[in-house]
Amino acid sequence: MSVHKEVKKVTTHILQAMKARNEKIAMLTAYDYSMARILDAAKIDVLLVGDSASNVMAGHETTLPITLDQMIYHAASVVRAVKRALVVVDLPFGSYQGDSKTALKSTIRIMKESGAHAIKLEGGKEVKDSIERILSAGVPVMGHLGLTPQSIYKFGTYTVRAKEEAEAERLIKDAKLLQKLGCFAIVLEKIPAKLTKIVSEELEIPTIGIGAGPSADGQVLVTHDMLGITKDFHPRFLRRYLELFDEIQNATERYIKDVKAQEFPNEQEQY
Ligand code: KIV
């Protein structure tokens, strides 16, 4: 019997048990009540209220503009829908870097006002103090290494990270540090599959990959990409399970046609 099938409520400890039993973790993003209900009913293990909401929900080019208040609004909507999944919320850009007291304040607002179960933040040793302070308040922390979109203007592109040996070594060091500090899992974004294998084998805590190959202990995708709601985003790592943009456009065109032709509503669709 798998941990995934037995579990009624996913916790950070369950995720660690899944890694120990070599059972992969499935994570997706969610930003609203209706979608979160569907994903939770499908028994997704982890729902990430990602700051990708900045792109997907608000149409910004980067994740930088989204605010703490906006993240809390999305997180509270997701939490209201969820019975089983672990809900993890991204600390948005500017809410934790550089000052661990601000990091804790932001975290406490998320936990109190949304009811979420854990937070995620980007970076390694540069955010060590923030991680320590958040953990000391009893809040579980998920790390995020490799491509860290909040630093896009430092890197300049969204290409694969840690291809060079020096950066790969730095990433391994950071991953070990995050584990030592007490993070319960680490997202590895867009790094070579070989490096993911090394990191995942060296760590006891689970790694969750996105564009990081099959050796991660779990996988995460942005739900709107996976369902084909976003249209012009075709990275190699993305598998689309539906083409919902086209499906929804088609349904909308049929609705418009029916309204214009006075075929909606019909006899049965009125009082
Ligand atoms: O914000 C997000 O959606 C993320 C995932 C891509 C891991 O951080």
Image: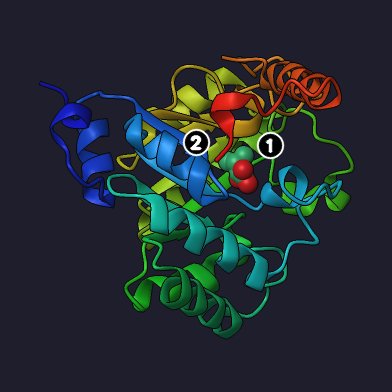
- Whether residue 120 is visible to the viewer of this picture, yes or no, is no
Q: Residues within 10 Å of mark 2 (few under 14, many from 20)?
A: many
For residue 108, above or below residue 90: below
Task: Say which quarter of the image contains residue 80.
Answer: bottom left
> Rounded to the nearest whole Å, what is the CA distance between mark 2 and mark 1?
31 Å
Task: Say which quarter of the image contains residue 112.
Answer: bottom left
Task: Say which quarter of the image contains residue 159.
Answer: top right
Q: Give residue 230's position: percent from left, percent from top.
A: 74, 28
For residue 53, above or below residue 243: below
Label placed on residue 166: 1
The residue to which callout 2 is attached is: 28
Q: Give residue 205's position: percent from left, percent from top.
A: 33, 43
Residue depicted at 65% across the width and 71% down the height: 68
Residue depicted at 66% across the width and 63% down the height: 92
- Of mark 2 and mark 1, the one earlier in the sequence is 2
Q: Nearer the viewer, mark 2 or mark 1?
A: 2
Q: Give residue 4's position: percent from left, percent from top.
A: 22, 30
Amino acid on which disc 2 is placed: Leu
Amino acid on which disc 1 is placed: Ala
